[in-house]
Image (spheres, rainbow, N blue to C red):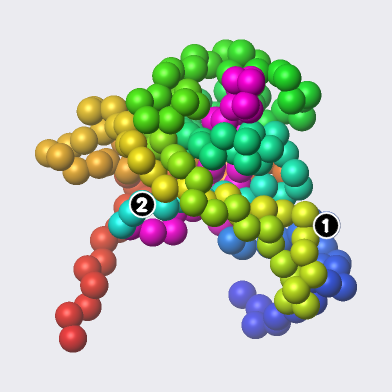
Amino acid sequence: MSDQIYSYEPAKGHGLPHDPFNAIVGPRPIGWISSQDAQGVLNLAPYSFFNAFNYVPPIIGFSSVGRKDSLNNIEQTGEFVWNLATRSLAEPMNLSCAAVAAEVDEFQLAGLTPLPSQVVAVPRVKETPVSFECKVTQIVQLKRADQERVPSWLILGEVVMVHIAEWLLKDGIYDTAAAEPILRGGGPADYFQLGPEALFRMNRPKI
């Protein structure tokens, strides 16, 4: 193992065959977001810049790099649903990221079933074992260090309803690995599958 360090300034280019940023910050959970416009046209799309940001209330968020249909829909309705992307749903998830016109329903394109939500008007993916119904709290256009705006938007939403398949609750505790979530890696096609072999435990230190 070499102790040589490769360094670069992103603004000047990385000089590598593929930008390593996405691979370094990863694997990342997938924001598989269902939304609909004001006329009820459905959209379903995966976002690799996604995570949870707060416990109480629970807040999740994803970033739209470029103005995409999900962002336009959410601006119109103030609602969206996050759906867990699992190994068994990897192919439909991948189909839903196709670059298609706004009027194309990715539920139909991917062979998935829209299931009515309980609090928001946006449907969730019936085939997934976990979904969060969300109401928007903030939409923030990102900026560079010099405060120049970039064409990316962070969409944050409060989780107002949670749906979990009961087989994922073991003695009342959610079994992360049993759901077999898939995670986005780097490069044009790298994904990872989370399984029980990846688990290790550490308790917080008591000082």
Q: Marks 1/2: CA distance?
A: 39 Å
Q: Which residue is mark 1?
A: 17
Quarter containing the N terminus: bottom right
Horizontal arrangement in the rendering, residue 91 relative to residue 15 (left or right)? left
**Residue 177: x %, y % from top left:** 34, 41
Figure check: 23 above or below 130: below
- Crowding around mark 1 (Cα neighbors within 10 Å: few <14, some 14 to 19, many 20+) is few
Horizontal arrangement in the rendering, residue 134 relative to residue 199 (left or right)? right
- Crowding around mark 2 (Cα neighbors within 10 Å: few <14, some 14 to 19, many 20+) is some
**Residue 17: x %, y % from top left:** 83, 57
Q: Quadrant of residue 75?
A: top right
**Residue 44: x %, y % from top left:** 60, 28
Majority SS type along the magenta span: strand
Figure check: 149 above or below 58: below
Q: Which residues are magenta?
A: 26-55
For badge 1, the amino acid type reads: Pro
The residue lying toward the viewer, choosing from 129 and 70, is 70
Q: Nearer the viewer, mark 1 or mark 2?
A: 2
**Residue 45 belongs to magenta span:** yes
The residue lying toward the viewer, choosing from 114 and 196, is 114
**Residue 70 belongs to magenta span:** no
Q: Which residue is mark 2?
A: 58
Which mark sits nearer the N-terminus, 1 or 2? 1
